[in-house]
Amino acid sequence: MAPWVFGSVSIAVAYLPGLVKSSLGDNALIFSTGMTALCAATGIATQPLARFVDRPGKPWLLGTALGLVVVGVLVAAAAAALVQPALAVLAALILGASYGCCQVCGLREVQRIARPDRLAGLTAAYQAVSYLGFAGPTHFRPPAGTYPPETSS
């Protein structure tokens, strides 16, 4: 689950700022920086709350996490379609929360299935695989030989 969740976070911090930059004027860099900080801070702040939702044997946290991913990606799509920085900020908040929930969900599952002598290694493997998702936005690049449409500044 985790790799594509990081991909959705990458959409918020790497892809969305570029899609709404025509609405930002000279503030595109500061907006992108703020989106990154906002998404990360929301993910970190969400993690303690996610622990309260987690119940062994019940998929509440998983459902919450995946629901947040879907809603966040839909808001991101709306932000891109409407070129609205405010919607991009909302998407970053939601996708940051999804990141926090998914990390807790994945790490709790590793804790449940790992034997005590394997916990550290499996936790490290989970973290390594989960961060591969930051490559997610590369799938959204235009095919070779195509160029983005001209935009007026």
Image (cartoon, grey):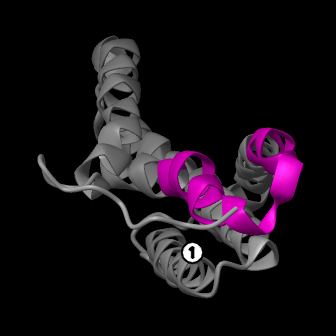
Q: Considering only vertical position in the picture, is 115 above or below 109?
A: above
What secondary structure is marked by label 1? helix
Q: Residue at x 60, y 82 (%)?
A: 75
Viewer-side residue, 126 vs 108: 126
What is the x, y in percent for residue 62? 45, 70
Residue closest to the far left = 144
Q: Considering only vertical position in the picture, is 124 above or below 148?
A: above
Q: Which residues are magenta?
A: 10-34
Q: Residue at x 37, y 49 (%)?
A: 137
Q: Is residue 52 magenta?
A: no
Q: Considering only vertical position in the picture, is 62 above or below 103?
A: below
What is the x, y in percent for residue 64? 55, 77
Q: Residue at x 34, y 23 (%)?
A: 128
What is the x, y in percent for residue 74? 51, 84
Residue count near mark 1 (Cα–Cα under 10 Å), binned few <14, some 14–19, many ≥20: many
Can see residue 1?
Answer: no
Q: Residue at x 53, y 85 (%)?
A: 81
Q: Is residue 69 left or right of residue 138?
A: right
Viewer-side residue, 89 vs 129: 89
Instruction: Name the residue that disc number 1 marks.
Output: 76
Q: Considering only vertical position in the picture, is 49 above or below 86?
A: above
Can see residue 3?
Answer: yes
Quarter of the figure that contains the C terminus = bottom right
Quarter of the figure that contains the N terminus = bottom left
Q: Amino acid at mark 1?
A: Ala
Q: Place residue 92 in its image quadrant.
A: bottom right
Q: Is residue 124 left or right of residue 145?
A: right
- Secondary structure mostly seen in the magenta stretch: helix
What is the x, y in percent for residue 31? 82, 49
